[in-house]
Amino acid sequence: MIELYVCIGSACHIHGAHNVVQTFQHLIEQHQLNDKVVLKATFCLKECGESGVSVTLNGKRHRIIAEDARAFFKKEVLALTE
């Protein structure tokens, strides 16, 4: 199972966490990955000083901007489903 966490704490919320969550939810449904990807919201991942939204994919932390959520999903998440 692929674990995908998105920080929804204050700093990440300001940087578009809600949009990232919505984009990931849409892509999981579009690619019929509900049985392979677990998407969870979480609070602070202790990277508030950085710009963008904190995302953890199978334990590895990433910082993404909301506009890059689709590209991140396609590059990083879809690669794990093949």
Image (cartoon, rainbow, N blue to C red):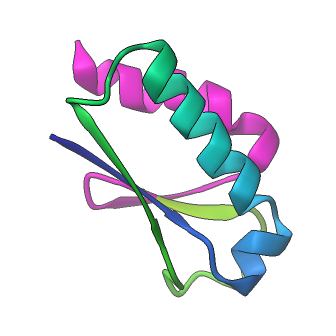
Give percent across and percent down for residue 75.
Answer: 49, 23
Q: Which residue occupies the foreground of this view, 50 or 67?
A: 67
Q: Give me the residue at 60% from left, 50% from top.
A: 21
Q: Which residue occupies the foreground of this view, 53 or 38?
A: 38
- Image-quadrant location for residue 79: top left
Give percent across and percent down for residue 4.
Answer: 37, 50
Report the quarter where the C terminus lies: top left
Give percent across and percent down for residue 70.
Answer: 65, 28
* Vertical placement of residue 39 versus 40, above or below: above
Magenta span includes 55? no
Q: Which residue occupies the foreground of this view, 68 or 13?
A: 13
Residue 59 left/right relative to 11:
left
Give percent across and percent down for residue 73.
Answer: 52, 30
Q: Is residue 65 visible?
A: no
Q: Is residue 14 visible?
A: yes
Figure disc tally: 0
Residue 44 left/right relative to 39:
right
Q: Give me the residue at 73% from left, 36% from top.
A: 68
Outermost residue on the left side: it is: 1
Residue 29 left/right relative to 57:
right
Magenta span includes 72? yes
Give the extent of the magenta segment: 56-82
* Vertical placement of residue 50 versus 10, above or below: above
Q: Give me the residue at 15% from left, 40% from top.
A: 1
- Image-quadrant location for residue 72: top right
Q: Which residue occupies the foreground of this view, 12 or 46?
A: 12
Q: Give me the residue at 38% from left, 21% from top.
A: 78
Residue 30 left/right relative to 50:
left
